[in-house]
Structures are given as C-alpha cells and as structure tokens.
C-alpha cells in the first residue's frame, strides 16, 4: 500500500510514482512474473508485459506497456 493504494507484482518505479499522482486509480498491478520486470532481470531477456490500473469505478486500464526485447 502506498498512500492507501495497492501495488501488486513487479511494477516499475515510474508507474508507482504515476500512481501517486492519479486520483482515478485505486491501485496497479503487473500480472505474472515477466522476465525483465523489476526484480526479474534475466541476462538481457525481456518479455512483453503491461501495467494494469484499477479505477475507482471498478474497471481496469492499461497504464503502461513494456515491449519484448
């Protein structure tokens, strides 16, 4: 929990900072454990993944996308 909002999974710091500035979101998450996400660095491997936000209205939205490399 950060300022009453949840952070779940291997979320990059940039999106955590963005979360603190967004009143429309109650939290963010990165589903799974994608290679290349924070804490999951694997010798230059990066799988594509999304950071998903949950709005106060209960819908989800893509907050950020990280491509595979």
Image (spheres, grey):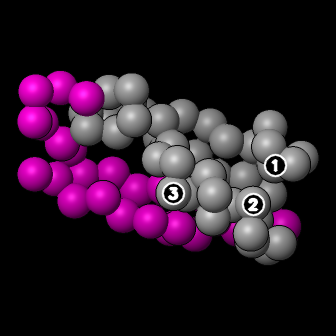
Q: CA distance from mark 3 to mark 1?
A: 15 Å
Q: Are marks 2 and 1 in contact (CB under 8 Å)?
A: yes
Give whichever of discs 3 and 1 has the lower sequence position. 1
Residue that carries the numbered disc 3 in the rendered image = 14
Q: Nearer the viewer, mark 2 or mark 1?
A: 2
Give whichever of discs 2 and 1 has the lower sequence position. 1
Residue at x 48% of width, y 36% of height: 10
Q: Is residue 40 left or right of residue 24?
A: left
Give the residue at the far right of this rendering.
4
Q: Position of residue 22 (x, y in %)?
A: 75, 71
Q: Badge 3, how many Cα within 10 Å: few under 14, some, many 20+?
A: few
* Magenta stretch: includes residue 65: yes
Residue that carries the numbered disc 2 in the rendered image = 20
**Numbered-mark total:** 3
Specify the label residue 55 is tagged with. Answer: none
Q: CA distance from mark 3 to mark 2?
A: 10 Å
Give whichever of discs 3 and 2 has the lower sequence position. 3
Closest to the observer, 27 or 17: 17
Residue at x 55% of width, y 57% of height: 15
Q: Nearer the viewer, mark 3 or mark 1?
A: 3
Q: CA distance from mark 2 to mark 1?
A: 8 Å
The part of the chain drawn in magenta is 41-69
Q: Badge 2, how many Cα within 10 Å: few under 14, some, many 20+?
A: some
Q: Is residue 22 above or below residue 11?
A: below
* Magenta stretch: includes residue 62: yes
Q: Badge 1, how many Cα within 10 Å: few under 14, some, many 20+?
A: some
Q: In which quadrant will I find the N terminus? A: top right
Residue at x 44% of width, y 65% of height: 64
Q: Position of residue 11 (x, y in %)?
A: 51, 43
Residue that carries the numbered disc 1 in the rendered image = 5
């Amino acid at each position: 929990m950060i300022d009453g909002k949840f952070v779940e999974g291997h979320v990059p710091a940039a999106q955590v900072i963005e979360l603190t500035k967004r009143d429309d979101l109650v939290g963010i998450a990165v589903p799974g454990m994608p290679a290349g996400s924070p804490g999951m660095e694997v010798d230059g491997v990066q799988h594509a993944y999304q950071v998903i936000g949950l709005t106060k209205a209960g819908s989800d939205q893509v907050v950020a996308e990280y491509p595979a490399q």
